[in-house]
Image (cartoon, helix red, strand yellow):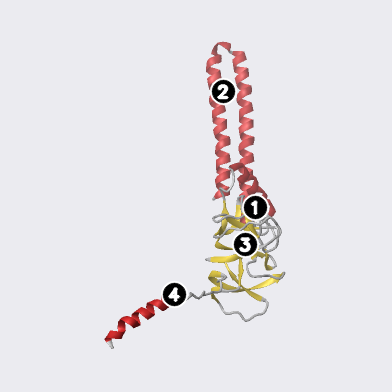
Amino acid sequence: MRRYLPYLFFIIIFIFIFLPPKNVYAQRIGSMGVAIPVEITEGEVNPGDILCSEEGGISLCSIPYATSIFGVVTQNPALAFEIDQPDHVLVVDSGSAVVRVNSSNGAIQEGDLVTTSVIPGIGQRADLTGYVLGIALESYSSDDIEAVGEILVALNIHPSSGVTSARSNLIASFRQGLSAPVIAPLASLRYLLAFAIAIMSFALGFIYFGRVISSGVEAIGRNPLASRKIQITVLTNIVITLVIVGTGLAVAFLILII
């Protein structure tokens, strides 16, 4: 029996090496988070759609950078609570999920932030300050901006800043705060407070600046011999004015990004 062992070993090796391999196929998991059943109050949803929490309930997100992002519809979650209602769908808000996106705001590259769009339930690339759904783990591009594809997204719903310049950040944040006073009243109050502080800083700065210049000119006219000291005093007050305005803008910016 032992003399046949080398031949048997050779036959086994031959089978593993020369037999054609068989492909193994697996179903793509829709998400890697825990899914919960949610009732949809408006519209027909598909797996990968982005949902928002509105006053009337859960529905498809239909505005860019929506502040009320709730989660993503999934069909094949890794773990889910039991669902037995026909009008409920499984929704995940953490982990990773397959999300329906388009290229209406440009091609999506791996690592880009993904947010909501004007098309109900569809995501897009985020390039402004605002709420985002998460980070793209796959790339997507299409010449047809109305075409819809699917990519894997690492879900992390949060307000994002630093995507654009400081000027664009301020403008986008003010617009976002004014566009959603009902959905996110606390966030809107934060934006309005920052806007008020910025306006007050400019107003105080210009008022103080005008008074300093006016008093400086009058002082030089009354006492020309002390013009040097008066000019230094005026310049010092101008620097103080700029510091006041800059501090106000810095406080307003911090309110927006924190």
Local SS, label 1: loop
Distance from disc 4 to disc 2, alpha carbons, whole Å, reads: 91 Å
Front-most of residues 125 and 149? 149
Where on the picture, by quarter, is residue 220? top right
Q: Which residue is mark 2?
A: 234
Badge 4 or badge 3: first in the primary sequence: 4
The residue lying furthest to the bottom in this view is 1
Local SS, label 3: strand
Distance from disc 4 to disc 3, alpha carbons, whole Å, reads: 53 Å
User: Is residue 241 visible to the viewer in this orientation of the structure?
Assistant: yes
Residue 182 picture location, percent across and down: 68, 58
Residue at 61% in and 13% down: 222
Question: Disc 2 marks which amino acid?
Answer: Val
Question: Disc 3 marks which amino acid?
Answer: Ile
Q: Which residue is mark 3?
A: 69
Where on the picture, by quarter, is residue 108? bottom right
Q: Which residue is mark 4?
A: 18
- For the residues carrying marks 4 and 1, which lies nearer the camera in this image? 4
Badge 1 or badge 3: first in the primary sequence: 3
- For the residues carrying marks 3 and 2, which lies nearer the camera in this image? 3
- State if disc 3 and disc 1 touch (CB < 8 Å): no
Label 3: few (<14), some or many (≥20) within 10 Å? many
Image vertical order of residue 212 relative to residue 124, above or below: above
Image vertical order of residue 3 relative to residue 164, above or below: below
Distance from disc 2 to disc 1, alpha carbons, whole Å, reads: 51 Å
